[in-house]
Amino acid sequence: MAMLFMAPGLKAASWVEHLQAQDPGLDLRVWPNSGPPEEIEFILCWKHPLGEFRKYPNLKCIASLGFGVDHILRDPGLPPGVPVVRLVDEAMTRAMSEYVVAAVLNHTRRFNLFRQDQAEKVWKPRSSLHTPEVHVGIMGLGTLGRHAAATLRLLGFPVAGWSRTARQIEGVECFAGPKRLDEFLARTDILVCLLPLTPATRDILDRRVFARLPSGAYLINAARGDHLVEEDLLAALDSGHLSGACLDVFRTEPLPEAHPFWSHPGIALTPHSASHTYPADVAPQIVENYRRVRSGQAPLNRIDMDKGY
Ligand code: GLV
């Protein structure tokens, strides 16, 4: 029985090395060389070709090579009843918080504007935004959102969070559910999206949400491109209602050359680089999950299929 690595966009060699270091006897195959499909019990995937799962009749688990599982759940051929798991990793979590902090500080310390001044050789001192008065609001209070909230709090930002179900986090004002979204938005100067992508959160960053933010608010999206209605962001920036945005994810990746985000002065963008998965760090949890499902135990970090995360 075997594990299949099915991530056409990633370099398999390093994954193979680190997974086999955990278990030298591991029968690990790299798609498309899966061998007889009935031998595959565990698939490790990232942006796999849709429909491919159907070929493997004896699957016991499908594991994402990232935090998100939207790339797996959108497959219409997802075999019912097979557990789907994701990675949860401290280095990835920390990296995401670093990204959020960098994006917040680029805005509050005016680095975004200083870069533009530098390009024009303009010497123009600008005062920073005053940290205790900048209300950061984080959408999504899972592992990533909670860590980012704690990190921003250490820097002195007043932090609130919004999530589907009620949470209690020390020092973080928590709002839950659609009914409390407006209240959360009205107190938010910097909106950070760290939500999972589900049918309920797709297109959530739209004109309605932007209109509820105070004038001059700033947006950071490090979750998924499909959370954001791109035309609505452009309209909110061009009207001056939003002061800027930092985006790591896009509806189409790579971002097409003709896309208006590339040259918009209010947008700082990065190419889906907020957080990385390091094979050496996560190989132990993958091999542990493989061991668990083969011995009939429940895998770690299993997705709730009803919630979609
Ligand atoms: C990256 O986008 C991830 O889901 O880990």
Image: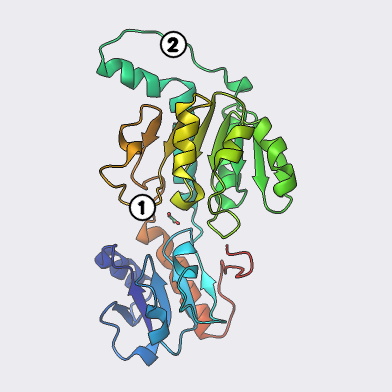
Secondary structure type for disc 2: loop
The quadrant of the image that shows the N terminus is bottom left
Judged from the image, the quadrant occupied by ligand 1 is bottom left
Task: Give the residue at x 61% y 45%.
Answer: 146
**What residue did someone put label 1 on?**
252
Q: Amino acid at mark 1?
A: Thr
**In the image shown, does 94 or 30 lie closer to the viewer?**
30
Q: Nearer the viewer, residue 208 or 99?
A: 208
Q: Is residue 86 above or below residue 214?
A: below
Q: Quadrant of the C terminus?
A: bottom right
Secondary structure of the residue carrying numbered label 1: loop
Residue 291 relative to residue 175: left or right? left
The image quadrant that residue 5 belongs to is: bottom left
Question: Where does the image place residue 140, in percent across and percent down from the top left?
Answer: 60, 48
Q: Earlier in the sequence, mark 2 or mark 1?
A: 2
Q: As drawn, is 161 to the left or to the right of 84?
A: right
Which of the two marks, 2 or 1, is nearer to us in this view? Answer: 1
Q: Is residue 137 above or below residue 71?
A: above
Q: Residues within 10 Å of mark 2 (few under 14, many from 20)?
A: few
Residue that numbered label 2 is attached to: 126
Q: Position of residue 174 (x, y in %)?
A: 71, 42
Q: Measured along the vertical axis of the image, is residue 218 above or below residue 258?
A: above
**For the point 41% across and 76% down, which residue is it?**
43
Q: Is residue 244 left or right of residue 32?
A: right
- Indicate if the residue with disc 2 has its beta carbon within 8 Å of ligand 1: no
Residue 147 in sight from this viewpoint: yes
Kind of residue at badge 2: Arg
Distance from Cα at disc 2 to Cα at disc 1: 35 Å
Residue 190, x across and y down, in percent: 56, 31
**Residue 298 position by quadrant:** bottom right
